[in-house]
Image (spheres, helix red, strand yellow):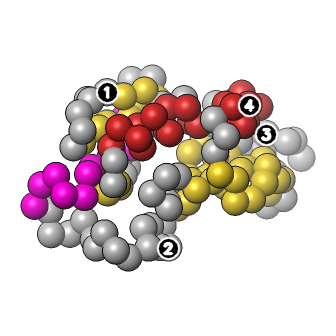
Amino acid sequence: MKPQPLIAVNDVAASRRWYQAALGLVGGHGGDDYEQLMAGDEMVLQLHRWEAHVHPHLGEVDIAHGNGVLLWFLAGDFDVALRRIRQADAEVLEGPKVNPNARHREIWLRDPDGYVVVVAGHYGDLGA
């Protein structure tokens, strides 16, 4: 089993552009109501417009998005990911920093809908 998180967004096209620019993901479905974002051949995130379909469990549009849930992405190459994030002028909440417990680097971002997105290097990528 693999997770395929779905987040509700105000503007699928704008969110798609942000995730493409900041994380290097690629659209796999297209459309203004729903998108699948891909890393290679793997779907890693779904975007769904709040008002697109009747899904009673998406949540409430007026409440903070993702409260208590973080979208965590493992970068194949943290330095490349960091350059992409900086070029995209993404809002940085924290970092880049070293997580001493995981012995890797990470950077915490906020996406256009207010979700917290973390991009991290591989566990132990800084050595012992």
Callout 2 amino acid:
Gly
Q: Is residue 2 visible?
A: no
Of the numbered discs 3 and 1, the one sitting upstream in the chain is 1
Residue linked to disc 2:
68
Q: Residue at x 58, y 56 (%)?
A: 110
Q: Give the Cα separation between the discs numbered 1 and 2.
A: 27 Å
| CA separation in Å, label 4 and label 3 | 17 Å
Label 2, label 3: how many angstroms apart (C-alpha)? 27 Å
Which residue is at a point 12% across and 55% down the rendered structure image?
53
Residue closest to the far bottom: 63
What residue do we see at 27% from left, 49% from top? 48
- Report the residue marked by disc 3: 125
Residue 28: give its label: 1
Rounded to the nearest whole Å, what is the CA distance between mark 2 and mark 4? 27 Å
Amino acid type at mark 1: Gly
Which of discs 2 and 4 lies nearer the camera? The answer is 4
Q: Secondary structure beneath disc 3?
A: loop
